[in-house]
Image (cartoon, rainbow, N blue to C red):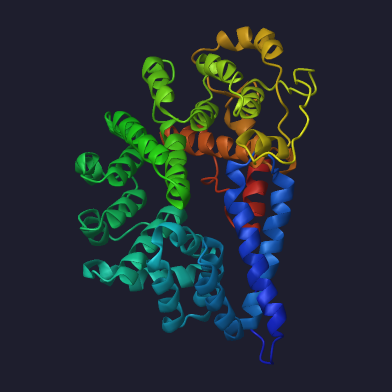
C-alpha cells in the first residue's frame, strides 16, 4: 500500500530528519560495493531504513520540497540529489524538477548519479513522464536540458527500457560526449555503436565497447586501451577529481573483466595490471576470478599499504579464511598520532594482516593453478547455482563479493542467456525490489 501525502501540517524537524537520514543511508548503499567490511544483512537493514525515510517524505508531500531543495543547495552531494529527485518526482511539478536539474547541471559529474538513482527507484509513471519530457530536448544546448537527457538515457539503461529508434540515433550523434556515452549504455548493443569505438572522447569509446561486448571483436581491446588511459588520468588527478576518475576506472575494470579471455589474453592482462594502481589491479583480479593471476596477488602481499587488501582478495578467490586458518600475522601496535593510511583504513574495516610466507605456502595455490581456464570465487567455479547462493541476502557475504557475483551473473546472462533464469541483478535497487530479487534467486539454490 503506497503512502498518501498528509492533508494536515507536518513537523518540520521530522521532515528534515527524513531528508538527512535518507541521504545518509543512500550514501551507505552507494559506497558498499567498494568496501569489504559491509555485509548483505546489514545493507538490507540500511535499505529498509532508507525506504522508511522515503515513505515519510512521500507522506509529507509538498511540505518536504523546500527542505529537500535547501539540503541539495547547501551540501551539493549525490545523496541529497537522490532525495530531492525522489520528492520532485513524487510531486510531478515541473518547477520542482527544473530546480533539481539546475542544481545537478552545476556539478553533473558529482550529482548526476544521485538523480539517476532516484529515477531508477521511481514509479514507472514518473519515469515515463521524465523521459517523454527529455526526448524533445535532444537539440537543446542548455545544461539542465542535457542533464535531463543524460539522466533519462541512463535510467532507461538501468531499467531496461527500449529507446525510440529516432531518439537513439540522435543521441548517438549528439555533440555532447556525455549524451553519446549515456546513449551507448541505453543502446542494447545496437550495431550502430560500431563507429563510436573510434570516437574522439575516451568515455564514449569505453561505453560503446562495454555495450557491444563480445558482439564486436575489437571491443575488448578498445576497452583495455581506455582503461590504460583512464588509469593515467586517475593517478595524475587530485582531490575530488581523483575520486571521480577512480570511480570511472573501477567501473570500466569491472566490465573489462568479462570482455576478455583470461586464458588467451594472460600476457596482455599482466601488462595492464602493471600499469594500474596496485589497489585497482587487485580489485580487477578479484572480478576477473582467474587463478592464473593468483601469483600477482601473492606478490602484492609484500606491499605494506596494500597487504591487507591483497589478503582479502586472496581469501575471496581461494575461499580460505586467513584468520580461521591461522594465516594472519600479529597486529602491530596502533600509533594514534600517525596519519590515516590506506593500510589503517583496511584494518579498521576488519581486514586481517596476512602472514605472507604462510599464505604463499598454502596448498590451495597449487590446487587453483590447475584450474587455469576457470573463473572462481571463494574457491568454486562461477556456476549459476553458486552465484545465486552468493547473491542471496541470507549468505551475508560482503557487498563487494556480492558485486563480483552480480557482475558474473549479468555477464553470463548476456553472453549465454540459456545459462540463466531471472532478471538482471541490481544490488542498488530499492528494498522491495531487493526482496523480490532475493525470492527469485531462492528458486535457483
Tally of numbered tags:
0
> Does residue 3 appear in this view?
no
Residue in view at x 22 percent, y 56 percent: 169
Q: Name above or below for residue 40 compared with residue 370.
A: below
Residue in view at x 49 percent, y 30 percent: 284
Position of 206 with respect to 244 (left or right) is: left
Residue in view at x 67 percent, y 15 percent: 356
Q: Nearer the viewer, residue 172 or 37?
A: 37
Residue 407: percent from left, percent from top? 51, 37
Residue in view at x 40 percent, y 21 percent: 269
**The C terminus lies in which quarter of the figure?**
top right
Residue 208: percent from left, percent from top? 30, 43
Q: Name above or below for residue 425 compared with residue 355.
A: below
Position of 247 with respect to 286 (left or right) is: left
Residue at the limit of the structure toward the front, as seen here: 337
Q: Nearer the viewer, residue 93 or 303?
A: 303
Q: Nearer the viewer, residue 147 or 342?
A: 342
Q: Name above or below for residue 327 compared with residue 436.
A: above
Residue 394: percent from left, percent from top? 74, 42
Quarter of the image where one finds residue 141:
bottom left
> Does residue 330 appear in this view?
yes
Residue 344: percent from left, percent from top? 68, 36
Amino acid at each position: 500500500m503506497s503512502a498518501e501525502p498528509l492533508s494536515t501540517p507536518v513537523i518540520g524537524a521530522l521532515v528534515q530528519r527524513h531528508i538527512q537520514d535518507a541521504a545518509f543511508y543512500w550514501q551507505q548503499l552507494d559506497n558498499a560495493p567498494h568496501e569489504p567490511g559491509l555485509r548483505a544483512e546489514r545493507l538490507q537493514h540500511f535499505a529498509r531504513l532508507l525506504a522508511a525515510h522515503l515513505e515519510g517524505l512521500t507522506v509529507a508531500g509538498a511540505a518536504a520540497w523546500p527542505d529537500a531543495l535547501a539540503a541539495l543547495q547547501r551540501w551539493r552531494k549525490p545523496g541529497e540529489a537522490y532525495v530531492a529527485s525522489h520528492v520532485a518526482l513524487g510531486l510531478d511539478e515541473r518547477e520542482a524538477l527544473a530546480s533539481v536539474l539546475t542544481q545537478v547541471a552545476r556539478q553533473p559529474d558529482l550529482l548526476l548519479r544521485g538523480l539517476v538513482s532516484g529515477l531508477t527507484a521511481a514509479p514507472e509513471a514518473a519515469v515515463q513522464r521524465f523521459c517523454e519530457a527529455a526526448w524533445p530536448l535532444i537539440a537543446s544546448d542548455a545544461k539542465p536540458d542535457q542533464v535531463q537527457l543524460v539522466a533519462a538515457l541512463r535510467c532507461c539503461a538501468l531499467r531496461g527500457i527500449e529507446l525510440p529508434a529516432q531518439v537513439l540515433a540522435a543521441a548517438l550523434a549528439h555533440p555532447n560526449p556525455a549524451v553519446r556515452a549515456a546513449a551507448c549504455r541505453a543502446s542494447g548493443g545496437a550495431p550502430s555503436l560500431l563507429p563510436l569505438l573510434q570516437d574522439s572522447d575516451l568515455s564514449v569509446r569505453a561505453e560503446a565497447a562495454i555495450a557491444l561486448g563480445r558482439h564486436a571483436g575489437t571491443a575488448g581491446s578498445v576497452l583495455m586501451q581506455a582503461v590504460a588511459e583512464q588509469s593515467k588520468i586517475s593517478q595524475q588527478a587530485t582531490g575530488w577529481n581523483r575520486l571521480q576518475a577512480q570511480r570511472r576506472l573501477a567501473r570500466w575494470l569491472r566490465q573489462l573483466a568479462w570482455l576478455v579471455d583470461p586464458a588467451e589474453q594472460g600476457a596482455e592482462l599482466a601488462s595492464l595490471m602493471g600499469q594500474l594502481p596496485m589497489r585497482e589491479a587487485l580489485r580487477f583480479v578479484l572480478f576477473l576470478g582467474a587463478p592464473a593471476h593468483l601469483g600477482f596477488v601473492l606478490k602484492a602481499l609484500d606491499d605494506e599499504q596494500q597487504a591487507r587488501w591483497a589478503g582479502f582478495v586472496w581469501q575471496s578467490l581461494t575461499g580460505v579464511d586467513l584468520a580461521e586458518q591461522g594465516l594472519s600475522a600479529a597486529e602491530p601496535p596502533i600509533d594514534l598520532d600517525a596519519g590515516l593510511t590506506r593500510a589503517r583504513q583496511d584494518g579498521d574495516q576488519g581486514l586481517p594482516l596476512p602472514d605472507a610466507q604462510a599464505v604463499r605456502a598454502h596448498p590451495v595455490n597449487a590446487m587453483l593453478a590447475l584450474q587455469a581456464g576457470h573463473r572462481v570465487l571463494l574457491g568454486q567455479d562461477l556456476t549459476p547455482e553458486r552465484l545465486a547462493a552468493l547473491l542471496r541476502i541470507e549468505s551475508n557475504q560482503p557487498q563487494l563479493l556480492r558485486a563480483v557475483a552480480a557482475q558474473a551473473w549479468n555477464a553470463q546472462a548476456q553472453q549465454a542467456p540459456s545459462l540463466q533464469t531471472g532478471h538482471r541483478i541490481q544490488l542498488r535497487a530499492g528494498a522491495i525490489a531487493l526482496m523480490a530479487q532475493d525470492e527469485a534467486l531462492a528458486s535457483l539454490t
